[in-house]
Amino acid sequence: MQTVLSYELTKEVMATADIFLRESQRLFRPHGLTAAQFNVLNVLADAADGLSQRELGDILVVDRSNITGLLDRLEKAGLVKRTDHPSDRRIYRVSLTPAGRRLWTKVDSLYRKVVAQVTAGLSDKQSRDTIIVLKSLQVGAASWRLPKN
């Protein structure tokens, strides 16, 4: 792929991500959430037995110190709880509280409506093809190396 085209592609991906983040913050803020906090609730909503902090960090591609701070704030708000792991006392299992599940259900419903609006102009094929391209870019970005001077 040409360097100019590669640059244009990554510039547009970054601009799209920035717009998604900005607009999602407008959606989440009235509910007392940040986009990162919603992402935590969203991941935990599908984890019936909870997840460890490490598992959460791996899924969200977030540093352990950042996930700790996120969980501290969510726990203080009563949205998540940490419980001892049944077989390893060094690990906490993190799960949604009933209040966390109620908030997630409410906000997720709003989020899905917005996502449907944003993607309404795309065919199923365009959506599938875009997912493939984005996953390829994620792999490339995860393994990039800084150029030597």
Image: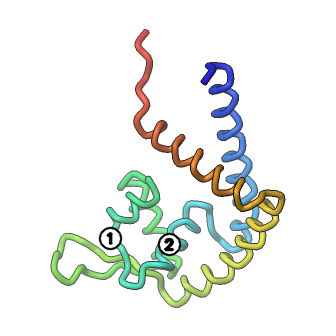
- For the point 43% across and 40% down, the residue is 142
Residue 140 in the image: above or below residue 134: above
Question: Which quadrant is home to the C terminus?
Answer: top left
Q: Which of marks 2 and 1 is nearer the N terminus?
A: 1
| Residue displayed at 62% across by 19% down | 3
Give the secondary structure at mark 1. strand
Q: Mark 2 points at which residue?
A: 74
x and y percentages locating residue 61 in the rendered image: 44, 53
The x, y position of residue 5, in whole percent, is: 68, 25
Q: Residue at x 38, y 58 (%)?
A: 58
Compared with residue 113, is residue 132 higher up or lower down, i.e. above or below?
A: above
The residue under the point 70% across, 79% down is: 109
Question: How far from the left and from the top, in percent, is residue 121?
Answer: 83, 58
73 sits left or right of 143 in the view: right
Q: Which amino acid does label 2 sit on?
A: Leu
Residue on which the image places disc 1: 52
Amino acid type of the residue that numbered disc 1 sits on in the rendered structure:
Ser
Nearest-to-viewer mark from 2 and 1: 1
